[in-house]
Amino acid sequence: MLAIVLLVLSVLFSVWTVMTLARYIQYKKTSGRSILSWPPRRPWYYNLCVGIGFFMLFLTGLSTFVLDRPPLVIIAQGLMAIFYTIVFPLIFRIRRGFFEAGISTERGFVVFSKIIWLGWKEAPEIVLALRAQGRFGGQRYSFLRVPGDYFGQARRILADSIKEHSLTLETSVLGLNPDAPTQEQV
């Protein structure tokens, strides 16, 4: 039973690592063309996860050189150590915000041409909700938490994108008219 659990953990952490690294590489390709961006907030458990990573690194070394554990145990511990010490902190180096090609959201990068709907939620924090065309004809939803200091600039960027026709959507959702001057839109 332990071998099955370790195998599942190995596969799970391998998939998370590959997905996160792919997202980080995609971000690095677009990060040079930032219009308005900010670092994401770290969750309260950030230091706990990094601590778990260093603990797993210690256990991997202990299992390899002192305890002579089976290879599957060492691999599972090593993958967890890599994820929590290297890959997990990379997630928080991906800046959120507006880039020339699109929007970097909580779930990944969305190209302007794929966005079909935008809306604001102004509850305790300001959130830009967007619906985009998915890869296989479906739709996917993404969210971007916008700091209050950036709200006006974010609306202006969206208005300019609509005016330039790089972003086409239902303008009534945002209350923005693409034919009106930019000053009236914000």
Image (tube, rainbow, N blue to C red):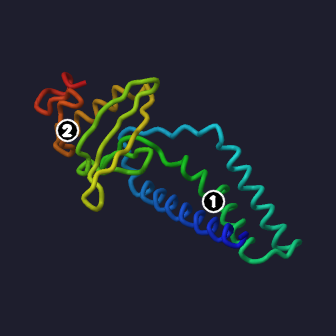
Between 55 and 179, the residue placed more toward the observer is 55
Q: In this view, does 178 lie above or below 48?
A: above
Position of 66 with respect to 162 (left or right) is: right
Quarter occupied by the N terminus: bottom right
Q: Quadrant of residue 151?
A: top left
Residue occupying the far left of the picture: 179
Q: Quadrant of residue 58?
A: bottom right
On residue 83, which mark appears?
Answer: 1
Position of residue 160 measured from the top left corner of the image (x, y, whole percent): 22, 35
**Which residue is drawn at the image coordinates 17% and 41% (left, top)?**
164
Position of 50 with respect to 94 (left or right) is: right
Q: Name the residue under label 2.
A: 162
Position of 8 with respect to 38 (left or right) is: right
Position of 176 with respect to 91 (left or right) is: left
Q: In which quarter of the image is residue 175?
A: top left
Q: Residues within 10 Å of mark 1 (few under 14, many from 20)?
A: many
Quarter occupied by the C terminus: top left
